[in-house]
Amino acid sequence: MKGWFEVCCNRLITALLIGVFASPLSVATTAEQIPLSAYEQAQKLVRLTDGRRVNLLCIGQGSPTVVLEAGGGDDSLTYRILQAHVAHFTRVCSYDRAGMGFSDPSSHPSSAEYVLQDLHELLRQADIPLPIVLVGHSDGGLYVSMYASRWPDDFAGMVLIDPFQVGAEENAERVLTPSQLKAWLADDQNDIAQARKCLALAQSEELRHQPQKHRDCLDEPANPDPALHRLLDEQMARPGEAAANLSQLLDTYPPAEGGISPAEKLAIQTPRKMGNKPLIILDATHEQFDYGQDLQDRLLLAMWQAQDAAIAPPLPAVAESLLTAVPITSTRKGRSW
């Protein structure tokens, strides 16, 4: 017989699924969202043992607490709508990783290893009751799945939204021609070069003083909400945020010569010990590639099959384990598997 906590977690996971459908990451028109003023200043600054402060935003009441992990280049603002919905039935927290939003920058790189360490300490310094439900979007999906494997007693269930795909290049090699694969990898290196340029402009304060000259480093195309557009421009012009974004790209993108990224290596080395816990995967089916519709379908299929193989084996084949793949819309630019 299931314990009350397991029943509660299964219901919460289902409610999260409904909440995401009611407010996908791309929606910006619902009235049920956290006011922008909450993202114009720090909410709760939690001090870590090394003296750094991490910005934490928690709303709602109930148990278990849901902790939201943003995708690459994003902070707590990305969950503005979803967090408001989840707060209707339990406590839900989002936070800014080191250097993002209002969190202090770190002397360490914004790599998966340090993201895991910071999250582990944040939960304890902020006295967030354990176990929690982990929700991760894109790169955040990689982080929470590794966190759950490293500290399985800390989590009661997990939702992965368009999660980062370990071994994406290997899967792409199956369906792309050599020239297409070269172009695909070049896109990654172009992203890194762009991030380096934006960091230099942020450090020189040119992004802040002459934003119209460098729209490609800011919120472009502009968000239709003028207030949100202004806030995003302010965030992306901060040197700490630009540095954290570049550092994360270097950790999650494969090297120029090909192969797997440092974050993927860490994921492969991390033993999977998630156990018999509820899991939902929300997968967007509208990624756009320039390689033709047939190749797009084949690439997505190859990557999804690989992801199934990577995630499913540690889960016991019993009814209590929930593995579901459903489509959602994602606004993440670039690679989102």
Image: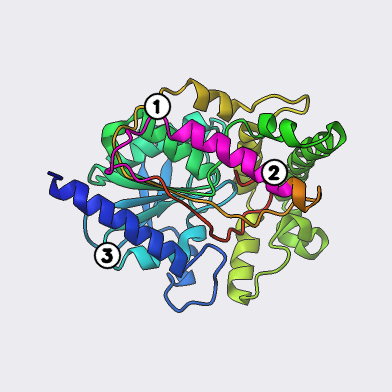
Residue 110 shows in this picture = no
- Residue 316 is tagged as none
Q: Earlier in the sequence, mark 3 or mark 2?
A: 3
On the image, the x and y values in percent for residue 101 come to 52, 53
Q: Nearer the viewer, residue 107 or 216?
A: 216
Tag 2: Cα neighbours inside 10 Å, few (<14), some, or many (≥20)? some
- Cα separation, mark 2 vs mark 1, equals 28 Å
The answer to whether residue 125 is above or below residue 83 is above
Q: Nearer the viewer, residue 291 or 228?
A: 291
Q: Earlier in the sequence, mark 2 or mark 1?
A: 1
Asked whether, in this view, residue 145 is left or right of residue 286, the answer is: left
Tag 1: Cα neighbours inside 10 Å, few (<14), some, or many (≥20)? many
Comparing marks 3 and 2, which lies closer to the viewer?
2
**Quadrant position of residue 320:** top left
What's the amino acid at mark 3? Answer: Phe
In this figure, which residue is indicated by the disc labeled 2?
298
- Cα separation, mark 3 vs mark 1, equals 30 Å
Residue 124 shows in this picture = yes
Please give the range of residues in magenta: 296-322
Comparing marks 2 and 1, which lies closer to the viewer?
2
In this figure, which residue is indicated by the disc labeled 1?
272
**Quadrant position of residue 312:** top left
Residue at 65%, 70% (x, y): give it: 223
- The quarter of the picture where the N terminus appears is top left
Residue lying at the far right in this picture: please name it.
179
- Cα separation, mark 3 vs mark 2, equals 39 Å
Q: Earlier in the sequence, mark 3 or mark 1?
A: 3
What's the amino acid at mark 1? Answer: Arg
In this figure, which residue is indicated by the disc labeled 3?
89
**Quadrant position of residue 185:** top right
On the image, the x and y values in percent for residue 67 come to 36, 50
What's the amino acid at mark 2? Answer: Arg
